[in-house]
Amino acid sequence: MKKIKNVTTNGVQNDTYAILKGRVHIIIEPTMFLAHISQKSSKESVRAYGNDLLKFFRELLEVSSTAGLIGYDFRDVTDNEMNAYLNAYLRRKHGLKLKSINRHIATLRSFYDYAYSHGWMAERKDFSFSVRSDEVKTSELEGITKQFALEYMSKDDLKTLLESVPTNNLFNCKRDQVALMLGYYANYRTHELVNSNNLRIKDLEELITLDERGIPSITKPMKIYGKGNKVRSVRVWPELVQPLYEFLQMSKRVGAKHLICRQDGTPLITEGHGTKNFRRAVISLLLKGELSLKEANLWKLRHFHGLRKCYATNAVTYCHREGYDKRTFVTQWMGHADYSTTEVYIYFESLINHRVLDNEEIDMEKVIKASQSEGFYKRESR
């Protein structure tokens, strides 16, 4: 593996690594993948990805398909061969611990997804990544990953959803768009939207400040009354502020005392409003007929509570960027009883952002345990 300095990718200069066969022949696919990773990961992370791929391609190149564990070409690796590589090569031959093997799994999954998306393989690989151990069940981790992949919505996904909110009534449309954004950008549960202690007009007026140009901002945490009337303080993402302020003005004009209200100013009390609102928007989106069958089926599986999980995942990214302790801040913002639940979001965030976790950053046993807790994947019925 050779370090390459000042490589320009998509107009951005970064240091990256090349995987070489011999001293001069670059293996294109892993090298391109590392250049891609270098655009959004730290130098340490890129090097860690590179070391993982170095082991894998070394094994591909040094053994024959008859005498070795796996064949010559990464495109031809079967599920059984991949599991042999994890168990016989990494675990037994190199003595890697299970946490390190799980890091290798994350690297290989990301590499193969990248290879497929760039046309280097005709079919997407669906490895089981099974490690024979009672300590960590990778099949369970695979289940967690697939579930989160279904539930996670990007900002573009949210934009698509907001544009699908029924528009036959302007007031109701703006209210319901803000309700969805409160889930994504402030981690509200559906019943918290209509809690009489939350989103009071007078509280929002105190929370939102205007600069000399009249541009609104929120610099203080927003207090949310949740389950059992417990209060948590959350960081509001900037994308929510302007739409929230604009609808606040609309609510004030109709004499409302609570943000989530009817057009006559009376507050909504249906605890499942967020859930029903989400479902109406999805139905409207499906009726447009612009989605592929795969996209349509994906939206049918999503729900309002998934917006809150998106907030948690994005909050982990924010803490990484700002240097905050993920367990402390995300746990507090989400109102988790302890940080074990936060472990799941740290794990998933590392997958979608190609982030390598070291042994002290994550406890895979806690990820599995938290994800199996009652109600973690239960959809809200209210």
Image (spheres, rainbow, N blue to C red):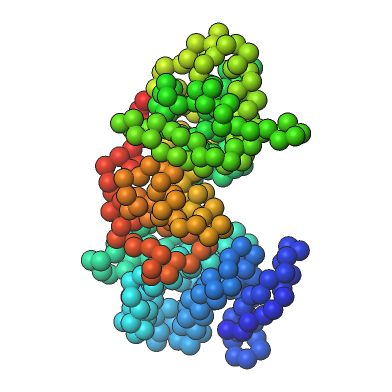
Quarter that holds the N terminus: bottom right
Residue 333: % across, % down: 44, 44
Q: Residue at x 30, y 39 (%)?
A: 375
**Which of the 4 image quarters holds residue 246?**
top right
Judging depth in this view, the residue of 124 and 146 nearest the camera is 146
Judging depth in this view, the residue of 223 and 125 nearest the camera is 223
Report the side of 283 relative to 26 (left or right): left
Q: How many marks?
A: 0
Q: Residue at x 60, y 16 (%)?
A: 252
- Name the residue furthest bottom: 23
Visible residue check, residue 159: no
Q: Residue at x 64, y 37 (%)?
A: 217
Report the side of 187 relative to 246 (left or right): left
Residue 382: % across, % down: 36, 25
Reply above or below: 146 against 138. Answer: above
Reply above or below: 7 against 1. Answer: above
Judging depth in this view, the residue of 203 and 356 nearest the camera is 203
Residue 12: % across, % down: 73, 65
**Which of the 4 image quarters holds residue 228?**
top left
- Name the residue furthest top: 264
Reply above or below: 330 against 108. Answer: above
Visible residue check, residue 374: yes
Q: Residue at x 41, y 38 (%)?
A: 232
Judging depth in this view, the residue of 223 and 117 nearest the camera is 223
Report the side of 83 relative to 75 (left or right): left
Residue 138: % across, % down: 33, 62
